[in-house]
Amino acid sequence: MHGLSLERIVLSVRSVVMEKTMKKILLAVLISLPLVACSNWNRATPASFDNVATTAEVKKNLVADGLTGIDVDSSNGVVTLSGSLPSRSDREKAVRDARKVNGVKRVVDHISVP
């Protein structure tokens, strides 16, 4: 009889340990789930939003280099630059500024230089 009650205690302790372990695993999964969902953000981003973000990033780079008066249009990784700049080196800088933006596949240069 003494052995039977010891057996019940051991089973009870195992049950409690297993329950705590399962709760920890469940908590870890629940905490990880939003992180995994966020990592897929770009895959679910509409192309129009990508185009707006690309255009904004190119314009930011142009302004940082002091290049103004350039129109920027983005569509599916193709950036079109148009307008006028005072020198060929400024035009080359503008094209480089567009190319270094993540997601840009090609740059169409319609920038005129006097």
Image (cartoon, helix red, strand yellow):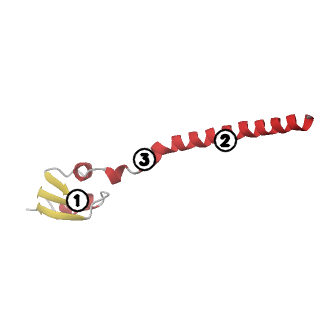
Task: Rate crowding at label 2 as few (under 14), some (14 to 19) or many (20 or more) other CA atoms within 10 Å.
Answer: few
Say which amino acid is labelled 3.
Ala
For image coordinates 91% across by 35% down, the residue present is 1
Q: Which mark is residue 35?
A: none
Q: Image check: 36 left or right of 27?
A: left
Q: Which residue is mark 1?
A: 76
Q: In terms of secondary structure, where does tag 2 sit?
A: helix
CA gap, disc 2 and disc 3: 25 Å
Q: Which residue is labeled 2 in the image?
A: 21
Frontmost of labels 2 and 3 is 2
In the picture shown, does residue 5 fall above or below 53? above
Name which of mark 2 and mark 3 comes first in the sequence: 2
Does residue 35 appear in this view? yes
Q: Is residue 85 visible?
A: no
Give me the residue at 42% from left, 50% from top: 39
Q: Earlier in the sequence, mark 2 or mark 1?
A: 2
Mark number displayed over residue 37: 3
Q: Quadrant of the C terminus?
A: bottom left
Q: Earlier in the sequence, mark 1 or mark 3?
A: 3
Marks 2 and 1 sit apart, C-alpha to C-alpha, by: 48 Å
Image quadrant assignment for residue 83: bottom left
Left or right: residue 51 versus residue 9 is: left
